[in-house]
Amino acid sequence: MKRITVGMFLLLLCAAHALPQTAKAPIEVPFEFVANQIIVQAKIGGKGPFNMLIDTDTDPSAIDSATAKELGLDVGAKGSVVTGGGTEKNVVYPTRLATVEVGALTARDVGAATIDLKQLSDRIGKPIHGVLGYSFLKDRIIQIDYPNLKIRFFAESPYPRISLAPNTVNTMVFPFRREDGDVIIDSVFINNEKMRATLDTGSSSSFILTPEAVAILRLDEQADESKTSNAVGYNGEYANKSGLLKSVRLGRFSLESVPATFWLPNTGHDKKTFQVNIGNAFFEDFILTFDFRGKIVVFERVD
């Protein structure tokens, strides 16, 4: 999944992850991992629970149009065409979520956009009522423990004495920035070529290359000869190609012969501030911590 744009929308670890005794324990909630998507249960305005995705590259959050009507939300009259994958034109409208409760965590007055999520729900095979994006995640420290299917919300960083260098094979630390609604890191090497990447917890894939990256890496012929598959974004269905990357390196962690997806031109992915989209099919072997305050992300590999 991609972001929504609306005009109106670890190197030193604490031993065994122990926090100082004075630190407040994190709020921990379970999640389902369905079709490589993170789904949490949330109450909105005291009603629910509803199935909500956790997506670092959606800005702001989103609520399914039918669910918004069910909740009686006030929806703005001025719509905007959503940006993201797909060849259709999906119009979104601004609204506000008075309260969003995820476990013992309560967020108030969360900006959102109403959007038709039926195609996405059908693709996942489970009703999706909304997406918790940047308007919910901002200023938070969220840890996604993929192996144990847990999400933790920390009041303070669980890595208070962390250093950005050096990284190790099993622990990677990156500063990140937000550009155009996306979480961006630098120095991801694809086939030894340095590229910008977005860390997208709303993506079910591992590595996806933009049309720009396919051209830079001269993978056009490989893309042309590969089979076509279909995916669903905020603007409906679109076609993809598949390929094989010789190498991928993040910090000291490296992989060889890596399957990847190639986004095609004119499918909503041409004008991006990044060249590589990294998603849940790669993240699932890690504990991944996003510190949106300190703009640092920590990958801790679980063997």
Image (cartoon, rainbow, N blue to C red):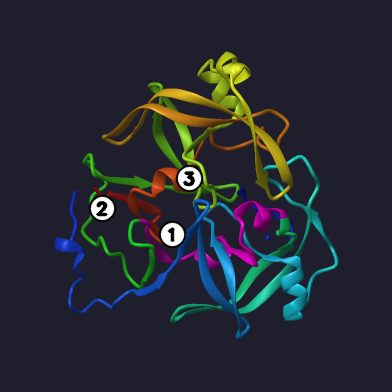
Of the numbered discs 3 and 2, the one sitting upstream in the chain is: 2
Residue to which mark 1 is pinned: 292
Amino acid tagged 3: Gly
Quadrant in which residue 44 is drawn: bottom right
In magenta stretch: residue 136? yes
Looking at the picture, tell me which residue is in the foreground, 174 or 152. Answer: 152
Looking at the picture, tell me which residue is in the foreground, 129 or 85. Answer: 129
Q: Position of residue 283 (x, y in %)?
A: 40, 47
Amino acid tagged 2: Leu
Marks 3/1: CA–CA distance: 18 Å
| Residue in the picture at 61% in, 37% down | 272
Q: How many residues crowd mark 1 within 10 Å: few (<14), some (14–19), many (20+)?
A: some
In magenta stretch: residue 259? no
Inspect this view and state whether residue 7 appears: yes
Of the numbered discs 3 and 1, the one sitting upstream in the chain is: 3
Q: Is residue 127 left or right of residue 302?
A: right
Inspect this view and state whether residue 73 appears: no
Q: Position of residue 45 (x, y in %)?
A: 63, 83
Residue to which mark 2 is pinned: 10
Q: Which mark is residue 279?
A: 3
| Residue in the picture at 33% in, 30% down | 255
Secondary structure found at label 1: loop
Give the magenta part as a residue range: 119-146
